[in-house]
Image: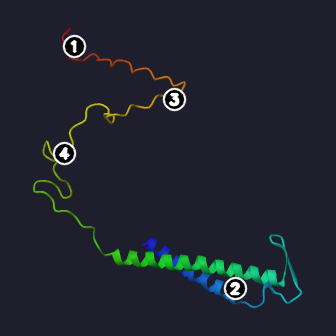
Amino acid sequence: MKNVLYLVLGVILGFFLLIIGINEVSKSNPTCGGQTMSHGDRCVSSKGGEKDYDAQLSSDHRGGYFMIGIGGLMGVGSLAVLVGALVTRGKQPQQHPATPGFPSGHQPPPPPGLGAPPQAGPPASQPGYAAPPPPPGYIAPPPPPPRDPGPLSPRTKGQ
């Protein structure tokens, strides 16, 4: 439910950005700080420096195209995911029938000889390829100490 709400908000925000972008592109007069400019005006801002009428109009149009692109992608993408989520919402995942004598979803292990043969120890290397040499200065770790059989091991029982 929460994901559906986020997707609906994504659709709304995307189309809102799309409308603002179309409005920016269709403007015939640029704005500077919320004020409409006229020919001969200069716009001075802390971010973009100083721009004349034509440069500011071009900047407003570029921003509008950017908002159209981002808003369109966000709106259409969120709408597509939302429709997909709503279509698959009622469907249950397909379950395999249970084998008699086993709980649902659990299958017996394969009979011996049909699965992969048991591996003892590390996997064998490919024939014809040697293991790469260790890097220079590599010192192999010491082998682990022998296991302590403990006081109740079969060897010490009864002694």
Residue 74 in percent (x, y) is at: 54, 76
Q: Amino acid at mark 2?
A: Glu
Answer left or right for 25 relative to 125.
Answer: right
Q: Please rate how many residues cluster around mark 3, counting C-alpha atoms within 10 Å: few if below 14, some from 14 to 19, many from 20.
A: few
Answer left or right for 15 relative to 102.
Answer: right
Which residue is the site of mark 2? 24
Q: Residue at x 51, y 25 (%)?
A: 138
The answer for how far apart the CA atoms under marks 1 and 2 are is 89 Å
Which residue is the site of mark 4? 115
Which one is earlier in the sequence, the residue at label 4 or at label 1? 4
Which residue is the site of mark 3? 135
The answer for how far apart the CA atoms under marks 4 and 3 are is 38 Å
**Dot 1: what SS?**
loop
Q: Residue at x 60, y 83 (%)?
A: 18
Q: Please rate how many residues cluster around mark 2, counting C-alpha atoms within 10 Å: few if below 14, some from 14 to 19, many from 20.
A: many
Q: Amino acid at mark 4?
A: Gly
Q: Place residue 100 in its image quadrant.
A: bottom left
Answer left or right for 111 relative to 153.
Answer: left
Which one is earlier in the sequence, the residue at label 3 or at label 2? 2
Which residue is the site of mark 1? 155
Q: Residue at x 20, y 17 (%)?
A: 154
Q: Residue at x 61, y 86 (%)?
A: 19
Q: Amino acid at mark 1?
A: Arg
